[in-house]
Image (cartoon, rainbow, N blue to C red):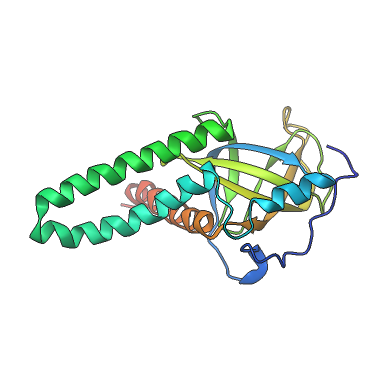
Amino acid sequence: MSDSAREAPPATDPATPATRERRRYYRVEDEVALSYRVLEGAEVDAALERFTPGFEDTMALAATFATTGGEMRRALDAVKRSAPEVATYLEGLNTKLDILGRMLAARESGLPSSPTHLVSLSASGISFDVTRPITPGSLLELKLLVFPSHICLLTLGAVVSCRPLPETQADFRFRVGIDFAYIRDTDRETLIRHVVQKQSQLLRQRRPDRE
């Protein structure tokens, strides 16, 4: 990971830059499958093309399926009251398309089907431990697989911090903090839902301890 990595460009691209809307997002500790690479030179321009309006790939398609799937389920609730058999058929079709999209995206991402990193995650950024330092200002391409939905997400992240960890951390020596500089709207919506669901799960797990 070279110190010569190109710095993140200003987040003014029309393809949903993270700074378009400064909102406060909830953050949770989570286990995800994660891969990343530092972008340098022409790699930055090539990566940015994937976030221009109208560009579609398998990972973007899977995220779109997940978002529209939730909208369809709400519509199906109304259909069930008048035509339950039709609603059952459409629900099954929607589920199959969702599964297919996730399988194709997971294959394209090359990520394993089980968690690889413990992270602190929100819809605006992520932090995790690394073995070697990454220069603040560098731009990373990150691929995330969240569980249990197995939805793959693609984002470009600007490194905002890289701090050494205590020497007791044998494998990982640094903690890197990243802001999502470029992320698709569908992926951000997916992250918001995922974090909310994760928070609800953690609250349910803690509730018996207080009783």
Compared with 74, 157 (above or below) is above
49 relative to 2 in the view: left or right:
left
Q: Disc count in the image?
A: 0
- Identity of the residue drawn at 23% across and 47% down: 91
* Residue 23 location (% of width, % of height): 58, 70
Most extreme residue toward the right is 4
- Identity of the residue drawn at 26% across and 43% down: 93
- Identity of the residue drawn at 82% across and 51% down: 136
- Give the camera-side residue of 206 and 158: 158
* Residue 151 location (% of width, % of height): 47, 42
Compared with 98, 203 (above or below) is below
- Identity of the residue drawn at 41% across and 55% down: 67
35 relative to 209 in the view: left or right:
right
Most extreme residue toward the front is 54
* Residue 5 location (% of width, % of height): 85, 45
**Quadrant in the picture for residue 109:** top right
Q: Quadrant of the N terminus?
A: top right
**Quadrant in the picture for residue 125:** bottom right
**Quadrant in the picture for residue 81:** bottom left
101 relative to 38 in the view: left or right:
left
* Residue 123 location (% of width, % of height): 56, 57
